[in-house]
Amino acid sequence: MSEQQSAVDVETTFDVSKEELSIIRAELAGDFPDDYLYLSDDYILSVASKPYSKDPTVRRPIDYSTGKLKDLLKWREGNATGLMSMLKMSQLPDTDTACVEQPEKYTKAKALATSLNYSAIYWHGLDKKGRPI
């Protein structure tokens, strides 16, 4: 592999200051007071340190990164619910009434449990509403 090719394969990241991290955290806390702490500093920094899609020679603007993180938290509010019940269902025998009456949900529950068991998905845990973090 040439040096030029390996340089292309390595993703560029940019520094994010502690002050900028504090600004992002403050904005997230204002809009998502119950959920913003579920995002680790490392995760926030990984989002904020990426190259900007409109100009890959510069870092994403803080407002752009904050917007992406807010979109993630909005998605979690409406879409990442019911995981605990899915995991409980995955442990039931396929002859259980709930599984027989809801075969599609049972299939999804089994697939979710398999993904988690094989580390295909990593979650730090679940928040108090059962959403992944």
Image (cartoon, rainbow, N blue to C red):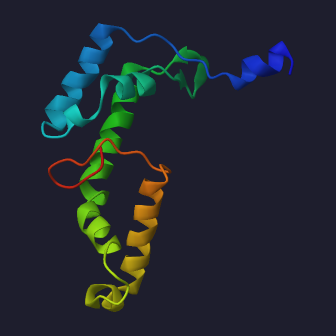
Total numbered labels: 0
| Left or right of residue 56: residue 99 | left
**Image quarter of residue 18:** top left
Q: Position of residue 77 (x, y in %)?
A: 24, 52
| Left or right of residue 11: residue 50 | left
Q: Residue at x 24, y 68 (%)?
A: 85
Q: Name the residue nearer the viewer: 56 or 13.
A: 13
Q: Residue at x 28, y 47 (%)?
A: 74
Q: Position of residue 96 (x, y in %)?
A: 29, 88
The relative height of residue 133 versus residue 62 in the rendered view (above or below) is below
| Left or right of residue 50: residue 31 | left
The relative height of residue 20 versus residue 133 in the rendered view (above or below) is above
The relative height of residue 79 versus residue 36 in the rendered view (above or below) is below
Q: Residue at x 24, y 62 (%)?
A: 84
**Image quarter of residue 81:** bottom left
**Image quarter of residue 1:** top right
Q: Position of residue 87 (x, y in %)?
A: 31, 65
Identity of the residue furthest to the right in this view: 2
The relative height of residue 31 versus residue 91 in the rendered view (above or below) is above
Please state, as top left, top right, bottom left or bottom right, where the C terminus lies in the image. top left
Q: Position of residue 31 (x, y in %)?
A: 18, 36
Q: Name the residue nearer the viewer: 36 or 100.
A: 100
Q: Residue at x 13, y 36 (%)?
A: 33
Q: Name the residue nearer the viewer: 41 or 110.
A: 110
